[in-house]
């Protein structure tokens, strides 16, 4: 099969899959029902009619193993549980995208008997089904990196607030109000858990479970121990803030040490050949002309 035709099919299939996922991830009916209930203040809200997305969600729940559903729920938790991507909507989109990928993969596989084309068709089939997983994983990784960068500065703000006379929850609320990233959202959510009656220990442990950062987990563990044994929270915050600054500096040094290795391959394969051609090219041409007797 012509590589140009194959690349054209892939460029057509990927936007169609993304457009399908975007359409399925918009939950307009649930949003409208929620706003209507909140504005009217009804005690008993009528159940919305079942739509095609609800039917696809039920099919997705039946077709997906329980362990895999828990894995998707974990990915959603790491991604911050976006409003447009509920678990039911993801389970509804996966069979649809899988069928689209299967159709496109079958079309590619039947276009040529070459084994490579068969492998490309199989890859497109699996790609269509696992597009939501890849998107959730990418969003979760970006969110965790953003939280890792904000952690040291947030702890410094909380330490200053505690030393100024605020309590730990007040310092957490101040850091959540002043911050704009995912870490500030998690702090606000932790305070909301406490306000609805959840214990402080459970709220702190839930904060650690919603993230995948070892630094944040160690900070939560230190706060839980300080709350259990009555240790001064300012001392714990001071030590944790110092540790986070040291780890941030170590990560920067690690990235700086990896930079020469990352530059090595582009240097060898893209920059050095061009330099050799520019520098040695005229000399080689002159040598060929001289030895050829022209």
Image (cartoon, helix red, strand yellow):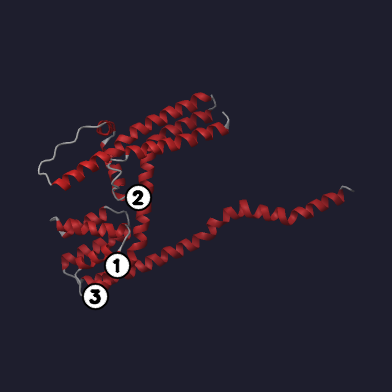
Q: Secondary structure at mark 3?
A: helix
Nearest to N terminus: mark 2 or mark 3 = 2
The residue indicated by pointer 3 is 163
> Considering the image in quadrants, where does the N terminus appear?
top right
Q: Give the CA distance from mark 1 to mark 2.
A: 22 Å
Seen in the picture, residue 203 relative to 123 is either above or below; the reply is below
Please state the horizontal and vertical placement of residue 198, each as a whole percent of the image: 14, 55
Q: Is residue 236 left or right of residue 199?
A: right
Check whether the beta carbons of the residues at disc 3 and disc 1 lie within 8 A of each other.
no
Q: Using a 10 Å C-alpha cutoff, classify the residue at mark 1 as few (fewer than 14 neighbours), some (14 to 19) or many (20 or more).
A: many
Q: Secondary structure at mark 2?
A: helix
Report if residue 204 is visible in the image: no
Residue drawn at x 36%, y 38% is 21
- Along the viewing direction, whichever of 266 and 9 lies nearer the viewer: 9
Badge number at residue 140: 2
Seen in the picture, residue 174 relative to 195 is either above or below; the reply is below
Badge number at residue 285: none
Residue drawn at x 68%, y 56% is 275
């Amino acid at each position: 099969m012509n590589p140009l035709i194959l690349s054209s099919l892939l460029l057509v299939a990927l936007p169609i899959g993304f457009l399908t996922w975007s359409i399925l991830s918009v939950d307009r009916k649930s949003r409208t029902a929620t706003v209507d209930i909140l504005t009217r203040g009804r005690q008993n809200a009528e159940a919305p009619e079942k739509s095609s997305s609800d039917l696809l969600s039920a099919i997705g729940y039946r077709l997906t193993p329980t362990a895999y559903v828990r894995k998707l729920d974990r990915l959603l938790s790491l991604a911050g549980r976006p409003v447009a991507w509920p678990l039911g909507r993801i389970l509804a989109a996966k069979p649809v995208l899988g069928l689209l990928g299967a159709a496109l993969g079958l079309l590619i596989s039947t276009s040529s008997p070459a084994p490579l084309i068969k492998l490309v068709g199989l890859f497109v089939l699996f790609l269509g089904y696992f597009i939501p997983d890849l998107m959730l994983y990418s969003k979760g990784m970006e969110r965790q990196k953003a939280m890792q960068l904000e952690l040291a500065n947030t702890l410094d703000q909380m330490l200053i607030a505690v030393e100024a006379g605020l309590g730990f929850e007040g310092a957490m609320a101040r850091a959540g109000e002043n911050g704009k990233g995912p870490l500030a959202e998690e702090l606000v959510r932790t305070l909301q858990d406490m306000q609805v009656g959840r214990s402080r220990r459970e709220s702190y442990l839930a904060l650690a479970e919603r993230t995948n950062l070892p630094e944040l987990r160690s900070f939560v563990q230190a706060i839980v121990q300080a709350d259990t044994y009555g240790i001064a929270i300012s001392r714990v915050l001071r030590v944790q803030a110092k540790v986070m600054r040291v780890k941030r500096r170590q990560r920067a040094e690690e990235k700086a040490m990896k930079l020469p290795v990352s530059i090595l391959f582009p240097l060898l394969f893209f920059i050095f050949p061009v330099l050799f051609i520019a520098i040695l090219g005229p000399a080689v041409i002159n040598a060929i002309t001289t030895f050829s007797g022209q």
